[in-house]
Image (cartoon, coloured by chain):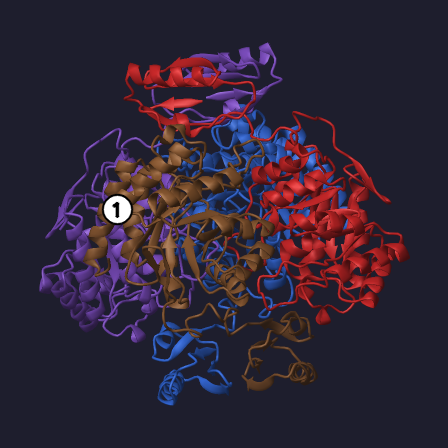
Chain colours: A red, B blue, C purple, D brown
C-alpha cells in the first residue's frame, strides 16, 4: 500500500506505478479528493520496500500482509503439538519445565530433578552454558554440565532442555539434551537460529529482551524455514521503564500469540518477574490467560545458587505453585 | 546513603558530614578500602537530596526509605476495605465494575446497566466527561451524562463510578456519583488529586500511561494525605515498545502492589489490551494473579459506540467473562 | 483503509461498503489475490474508526491521514513566528529562556535574572506553582511567586514564562506572566489545554513524559483549535528503560517536528538529562539538530535549591553554554 | 550495601554479618532509628549478590561499585586512541566511516567507496554478512562480499570495517577487514565477544537495541578482558515507545559514555533515525554533543539498494553532511 503525498504530480504517480509493475506486482489505484493511494499486490515473494519509499511524491509505504508465513495460523490453522517424554506441547496438557538456573554439581542437579518430578514437573531444565552480563561471573560447567544433565535424565527418566549459545555447539548439545533452548539474548542470532532449524530436536525459543511479538514470530520462522517445526515459544518478560520488577511480564502476549500462531506458548515467571515472591501469582496468571506451559527455576538452597538465586523457588514452594496452577487448569478444563 | 568518589579528600568528606548534620540528620560513616560511604539517618521529614549530590567529592546519593508513607504496608499492615453498595473493595470479594465507555443516551445506559447487573457486576461505570486525544472527537455529554448516571442508579440500584477531569468539577461529580475515577492522563494532576483528597467520596485511581508503581503510590499518597483514605488502585496497562496491543498489561503490578500497599488493587483489561478479544483471558489472569476486582467496558452494539467500541464486550460475552472469572476465584478460595 | 481478512465473504465486504457509504465517505475497492482492501475517503470530518474494526470479516483498519490539521505543515507551510520582548520564536534567532526551577525568594530570583540576562538569555523562567511527585515536597510560592516574577520583569526588562497547572488559574497567571508553560505532566490535561487556547497569551507546551510526537501535536491542536496560535513546542526528554540519565533526550524529535509542523521547537536540556554535567553538550546538540531555542535551569547556588538543584547550571557555566551554543549557531548561519 | 527490613531481629542481622564475613568481605554496620544497614566491602572480586538478598530480614541489596573495570575511566583516566589508516579513533579528529549497508556488487562498492573518500570519509563500511529479521530477505554476499571489500581497499586505500556475526567467522573476516563490527543484535552474544577479544583487530561495538549504557560497557569489558583493547563504542539508537523514527537516538549517551569510559564513542545516525532526511541534522547533533566520529550509510541509488535504502544518503548529500559536520567540529575546536 503506497500512499502518495497530497501534492504528488500525475507523473510521480506514473513512475510509482511503473516501478510496481516492474516488480511483477499487480496495481490498484484509489484516487481520493486529497491524495492517491496505490495498492501493490504480489504473490508472496519478498519485495524491497524502500525502493518505493524513496520515489518522488511518495509519502509512506504500509505493508498489509504479515512478514511470517510458516509460523502463522493462516498457514496452519490447527495447533502444532509434539511430545517430549511425558509432556505433549500444544495440546490440552499444561507442560511444566523446572530445574535449576545453572547445573552446579551432580548432587545439586539430582536433588532438584527428583524434587520437581515428584511435585509434578514433566521436563528438567538446567544451564550448562550460561550467558552472563559480566565476563567475571560464573559461566556454567560446559561439557561437564551436559554430562550431568544426561545422567539426571537417566536417573529420573525426565527429558532435558538446556541452552545453546553458539551455532557450532548445536550438534553437541543435541547429543545430550532432548530440547534446545535459545535464550533471550540470542533470539536474533540468525546463525544460531539457522543451525537450530537444521537440527532434528525440539526448540524452546525465548522472546528477546525487547523483541516485539512479530520479531519473535520471525525468529521462529527462521527455524521453521530451515526444516524444524517442533518449536515452542516462551514469553519471559520484556524491558520497560518499570524497575519494580526485573522485567515486565507481557501477559497480553499469551492470547495474542495464540491468535497469530499455531505454535505452543509457554511463560517463564522466574525471569519475567525476577523475584521468587512473584513467581507463583504470575504462574497462575499465565495459565489463566491460556498458556500451554511454564518454565520455572527451582533450587534447593537459593541463597547458595551460583546464578539467579533471587528468582528461584525452593522445592516445597514449587510444589505449592504446581498445586495452585493445577486448580486453575481444572477450572478452565485443562489438565 | 551518600557514596563518595574513590578520590574524595578527607576535607570533602568533612564537608558532607557537616551538611548532613546541619539538616538535623544522624551520621554513620563506613570507610572501605576504595571509598567512603556516609549514611544520613532522619526522622522521616523530607530532605532535599540534591543538596548533597552537588557537594564536591560526592559520587551518588541513594535513597533508602520509600517516599510514600500513608499508602505503605509498613504504615498499615492490614488491607484497607470499604463498601460501595453491594461491593466491598479490598476484602475476599472480587468486585466487578462494568458499563459503557461513554454515556451516550438514556436507553443505551439503562440497557447496559441492566445487562451487567444481571451478569453479576456490582458497580456501574460510564463516562460523562471524556478525555480525548483529539479536540474534534466526542467529548462526552457532561452534565447531562451525570444526570443519566444518577437515573441509572435509581433504576438499577447499582452504585456509579465516573471520571472527573478538573478540580473545580470534583464537588459536582461527587453530587451525582458514588465513586470518582481519576483517569490515567490525570494521575499526576496534583490539583485534581488534592481536590479528590478533600472530597469525602471513594476514589478509583488509574495508573498513568507510563507511571511507575512508585509514582502511582505517590499519587495515592496525595489523596490520603488530604484526608481521604477510600482509594482503590487500578492497573490499566502501560506504554511500552510493543504495538501488538494498545497497552502492555503490567500483570506483575498486581502482586507488587499488594506487597507494598494496603489499598485494594483492580485491573482494567479493556484498556490494558485495547481489543475485546483479549479482555476475557486478561480478566482471568488478573484474578489469578490476585487482583481484588475488575473494571470492564461493555456496550450492547460496540460497532456503534462513540468511543472505545473496539475494546468493549457485548453483554453476552461479558456474562461469559464473569462466569470464567468466578471459576478462577473459586479455585483460589475467593468469591 | 479497511483491510479485510483473507477469508472474508463477499457479503462481509458488502456490509463494510454499506457502512462506509452510510458515513458519507467515498469507497474504493482493491481486490488482490489474497484479500480485499476497501478505501474510505472522507472530507476531513472525524469518523469513529472502531465501527469498521468490529464488522465481521475485517482484519484491520489503518488511518491514512494525520489526525491533526491546524498544527500541520500541510495546513500552513510557513513557520509560525511570534515575538516576546527581545525574542522572536520560530525565526532565525535562537531563543534562550533561563532561570531557576522554582522562585524561592526575591533576592534569588533577581540575582539569577540579572545573571542570565547578562549571559545572553532573552526570557526569564521560574516556577510559582510546582508539580511535585511528593505531597510533602516544596509546592512553590504560588501567588507570591507570581508577584516576584512580575517584579523581576520590571527590574530586568525580561519577559517571563511560568507554569500553570489548573484551568481556573490560567487567567490569573496570564495577568502576571508573558507566556504560559504547560508542563509535561499536564500535556494531556484537556481542560487546561482548552483554557490556554482561550487565553490570549503565548504558550510553551512541553512534551509529556511518554507522549508520542503525534500526541504532542494533538495537544497543540487543542490550543490552536480554541483560537490561540502562539504555541511553541518543547522536547524535554522521554521515559525509556535507560536509567543513566533522568530522561532520554529525543533529539530525533527536533527534525521530525520541524518537518511535520510550522510551530517553533525548543529543547529543555535540564530536564532531558537531569544532571548539570550533561546540559551543555545536549544544548549544543539541540541547536546543531536545528532547534529554535532552549529553556535551561540556572541557580546561583544549586546545592541550596529547593527543587532540581542537580540539573541546574551555575550562572558562570550558563554563560559558557551560551557562548558554545552561539558558536554552533554561527556555524549553521543562525543567530 | 545490605538494607535490612525495619522489623529485622538482631539474630537476622547477625546471620547476614556472618555471611558477609564468610565471603571474605569487611563489614560496616549503620544502625538507624528505623533500620540497620550493613556495608560489605570487598577487594573487587565478584560476589553472588542473591545470597544476601534471600536471607531472612533483608529488604534489599544495593551494589555500590560499578560492575566493569577495564572499560572504566577510573581504571584508565586518559582516552584510548588507536589508528586505522588515516583515522585516529579517540583523539581530536572526527572519524567518518561511510559506505553501503550491503556490498551488492563490485561496481556499486567501488563507486560508493570513491565517492565517500572524496567527500572526506576515512574508513569504508559495507556488509558481507547481513543479520536480517526475515529468513527470506537478502542475507549478504558472504565470502564474495569480503573479497570485494578487500578489492575496494586496494583500489581506494581506505581501511575497511565489516560485520561479523558468528564466532567461527572472526578469523576469516579479520583476514579481509581492518576492523570488525559487532552489530546491535549481537551485543550480548558472549561467544562472539570472546572471539573478538581474542582477535588482534580493532572492534566497532554497536549498542544493543535495548541495551543500557552499563550493559554496553559490560560487553566492551568482555572484549577488553580477553586481551583486545582497541574497541570503539557506537550509539545507534534505542527502542522506545516512539514510532515516528525507526529508533530513538540516545544523544545523552555521548556525554555519559565519555564520562564513564576512556573508549572512543561514535554515533550511527542512519540506524538511529532510519530515514535519510534526519541523518544530517542528527550527525551534526552527535558531533556537537562531543562524539568522536560517525558511521553513515551511503548508496548511489538508494531506491535500488537491497537493504536499508530508506536511510542511505546519496553521495552528494553525504558530501554536504561532511561539510556541515566540519563546520560544527571547527566551532568546537576539533578537526
Q: Nearer the viewer, residue C256 or B128?
A: C256
The x, y position of residue C27, in whole percent, is 43, 13
Chain assignment, label 1: D
Q: Is residue A262 left or right of residue A188?
A: right
Q: Nearer the viewer, residue D4 or C166?
A: D4
Above or below, B185 against A228 in this view is below
> Residue at the location (21% across, 65% down)?
C318
Q: Name the residue rendered at 36%, 72% in the picture.
A: D78
> Could you tell whether D86 is left or right of A29 in the image?
left
Pinpoint residue B53: horizontal percent, then vertical percent.
38, 74
Judge from the rendering whether residue B33 lies leftward or rightward of residue D97; answer left or right.
Answer: right
Would you say residue A240 is visible in this rendering? yes
Q: Position of residue C119 (x, y in %)?
A: 14, 64
Q: Nearer the viewer, residue D175 or A252?
A: D175
> Taking C199 as reference, is A144 above or below it?
below
Nearer-the-camera pick, B90 or A190? A190
Corner quadrant of residue D86: bottom left
Q: Residues within 10 Å of mark 1 (few under 14, many from 20)?
A: many
Looking at the image, can residue A298 be seen?
no
The residue to which callout 1 is attached is D322
Amino acid at each position: 500500500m503506497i500512499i502518495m503525498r497530497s501534492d504528488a504530480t500525475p507523473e510521480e504517480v506514473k513512475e510509482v506505478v511503473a516501478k510496481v509493475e516492474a516488480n511483477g506486482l499487480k496495481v490498484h489505484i484509489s484516487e481520493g479528493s486529497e491524495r492517491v493511494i496505490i495498492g501493490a499486490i504480489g504473490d508472496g515473494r519478498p519485495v524491497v520496500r524502500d525502493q518505493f519509499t524513496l520515489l518522488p511524491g511518495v509519502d509512506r509505504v504500509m505493508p498489509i500482509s504479515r512478514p511470517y508465513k510458516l509460523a502463522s495460523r493462516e498457514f496452519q490453522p490447527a495447533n502444532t503439538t509434539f511430545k517430549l517424554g511425558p509432556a505433549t506441547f500444544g495440546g490440552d496438557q499444561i507442560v511444566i519445565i523446572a530445574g535449576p538456573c545453572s547445573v552446579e554439581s551432580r548432587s545439586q542437579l539430582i536433588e532438584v530433578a527428583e524434587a520437581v518430578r515428584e511435585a509434578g514437573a514433566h521436563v528438567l531444565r538446567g544451564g550448562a552454558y550460561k550467558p552472563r552480563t559480566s565476563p567475571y561471573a560464573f559461566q556454567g560447567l560446559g561439557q561437564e554440565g551436559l554430562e550431568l544433565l544426561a545422567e539426571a535424565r537417566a536417573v529420573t527418566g525426565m527429558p532435558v532442555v538446556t541452552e545453546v549459545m553458539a551455532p557450532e555447539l548445536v550438534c553437541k548439545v543435541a547429543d545430550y539434551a532432548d530440547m534446545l533452548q535459545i535464550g533471550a539474548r540470542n533470539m536474533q542470532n540468525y546463525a544460531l537460529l539457522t543451525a537450530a532449524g537444521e537440527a532434528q530436536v525440539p526448540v524452546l525459543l525465548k522472546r528477546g529482551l525487547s523483541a516485539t511479538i512479530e520479531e519473535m514470530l520471525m525468529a521462529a520462522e527462521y527455524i521453521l524455514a530451515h526444516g524444524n517445526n517442533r518449536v515452542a515459544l516462551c514469553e519471559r518478560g520484556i524491558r520497560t521503564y518499570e524497575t519494580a520488577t526485573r522485567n515486565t511480564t507481557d501477559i497480553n502476549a499469551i492470547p495474542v500469540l495464540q491468535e497469530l500462531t499455531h505454535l505452543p506458548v509457554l511463560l517463564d515467571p522466574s525471569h519475567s518477574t525476577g523475584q521468587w515472591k512473584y513467581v507463583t501469582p504470575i504462574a497462575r496468571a499465565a495459565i489463566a490467560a491460556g498458556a500451554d506451559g511454564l518454565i520455572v527455576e527451582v533450587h534447593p538452597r537459593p541463597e547458595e545458587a551460583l546464578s539467579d538465586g533471587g528468582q528461584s523457588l525452593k522445592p516445597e514452594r514449587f510444589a505449592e505453585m504446581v498445586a495452585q496452577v493445577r486448580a486453575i487448569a481444572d477450572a478452565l478444563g485443562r489438565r
